[in-house]
Image (cartoon, helix red, strand yellow):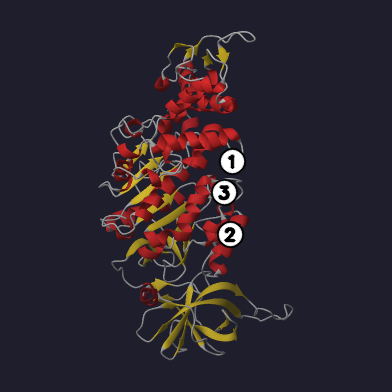
Amino acid sequence: MENDITFLGKIIRVDSNIVEVEVSNEIPSAAPIINGRLYKIGQIGTFVKIPMGNIVSFGIVSSVSNRPANLDIEKIYTGSRFLSIQLVGEKIGDGNFEKGIGTYPTINDEVHLVIEKDLYEIYGQKDEGSINIGKHASSDNLTVYVNLHNLVLRHSAILGSTGSGKSNATVTVLRRILEDFSGSRIILIDPHGEYASAFPDARKYKIGDKSMPLLVPFWLMNFEELAFFLVGAKQNDDQRPEYRKLRELIYEKKKAKADILKSGKVNSDYITVDSPIPFNIRELWYEIYWWMNATFNDSAQDKQTSETACEEKKGNPNELIPPEFKAHGAGAAPPFKSKHYQEFYLYEKKLFTRLKDSRYDFMFDPGDYKDTSSSKDLHDLLNEWIGNEEKMTILDLSGIPFEILDITVGIITRFIYDSMFWGRNEKHTGKNRPILLVFEEAHAYLNKNADTSYSRQAVERIFKEGRKFGVGSLVISQRPSEISETILAQIGTFIALRLTNSGDQSIIKSSAPDNLNSLIDLLPSLRVGEAVIIGEAIKIPSRVRMKLNNPRPTSADPELVENWKKEYINDTETYKSVVKKLREKKM
């Protein structure tokens, strides 16, 4: 076979996963033309094959040198070239390519170039369980497929520096799923509102939108989340009397609604303070304010009742108008100050401020999901988010205050996961219709350094347990080094575009399922739209080019040069509009 035009050279050293090859001096050209195609010998990241009877081992070129590795650097090997090859898999007879090495090559075994015919044997044809993700970097004719089951349920990540083509890669993956699988369903959490333009047929919910507003009812929170969000209570506040009283008040309000829920009556014995049951948060505030500020005709606490109160004017809880009472008397003269709920002074002020802030209307005034008097319940919300016929739902969080992005993503994630868990054996959800949750800008809310992160806890649970109940995840980030280690450790497939930060590159190296540093070392030099794909969803780690999608996400840089060439006039009205939006926090 040395006369074969694909012949490269022979093995001179074998390690546990590295073989070293001395390239033959008899090769007529460093760039032979085979079947009309030019091949570059010794190109980093390209494949080679090692035939051994009916077994063919495959490897990736990791380094090229003019001397063997681990030998005296002073010795000069005139005219010699040496390749270091990382072994990645093998093919036995007419069988399919398999990752891993069962039979190692030996000294003097021949090494050959891998040509397109060999690549087709490795990657195979598209099957019903795979999607087309792009073209192989070494061949314009070779389409690369990834296994959809492993990509979704074994979890995946798209990682890349700003400008590397990360958003385009995300659109490529999601669009292929939607085009090829009519029963697919995807929820994309979009913190910056970039993806609506790329998926015109998706169902889109956006905060403040008049036709399709994003509503996340506050009562979806468990008590710990709600107490933190409403009054800033911490986990270690459970011994404070106001914290315990707040828990009691919320529990009683939820329990009182057990018989009138739109999704069906619930046994009140099973209700806890964490149960996602609607109640009127403004009535809670009103009750606290009333008892804190009321005055009474009697000073004895047990005789201070609503009947003995000196109420001059009733308020309106739904409009946050407080009641008015007669001023308390001096000394022992009536009316007397209330002796109830006095520990709630700070809680009441914080709660009132939160309810008055219009930025939180998507939680506190969630339209048809406001409370049990409203027309819709959680089954309607599930149907709108994951049961709709569009297959993909985009939750645009661009209007959410940054300080509650974490808790909002946590609520959404936990709600969807819980619905899949409790519906795992239902006909049209759970394991019978899996779902893919996509987390864009994941480093912003899945940060490993955050002291408390509700979203991280919810997403980590999906990465650890989600596949059993039909929940898969895709995280997208430009800073993988900031993401939770628990999440990174559970990622089965990495789609890594250009990464220039050494810390981010080391995360890929340490977390990637396949220890192929030669491919990962290419990350800083990848072209825009190129990615190294490593993991369970692809047959062999590969360098892939993804086509430019159109329509695209609105994540491109501004046209700086074109805009700066224009002539502008001073326009006060523009800045009036800016300030109005800034103050109202509305686009």
Q: On the rendered structure, is 561 left or right of 427?
A: right
Taking depth in this image into account, of 444 and 22 the one nearest to the observer is 444
Dot 2 amino acid type: Ile
Disc with the residue nearer the chain's start (1 vs 3): 1
In this rendering, the answer to whether 519 lies above or below 352 is below
- Residue beneath the point at 38% across and 63% down: 135
- In front: 94, or 392? 392
SS label for mark 1: loop
Q: Give the percent coordinates (x, y) of residue 374.
A: 31, 31
Numbered disc in front, either 1 or 2: 1
- Residue in the picture at 63% in, 8% down: 330
Q: Quadrant of the N terminus?
A: bottom left
Q: Which residue is mark 1?
A: 238
- The residue labelled by disc 2 is 507
Q: Amino acid at mark 1?
A: Asp
Element under disc 2: helix
* Image location of residue 498, percent across then percent down: 52, 55
Residue at label 3?
447
**How many angstroms separate mark 1 from mark 3 (CA)?**
26 Å
Q: Percent position (x, y) of residue 326?
A: 52, 9
Q: Residues within 10 Å of mark 2 (few under 14, many from 20)?
A: some
Q: Earlier in the sequence, mark 2 or mark 3?
A: 3
Q: Amino acid at mark 3?
A: Asn
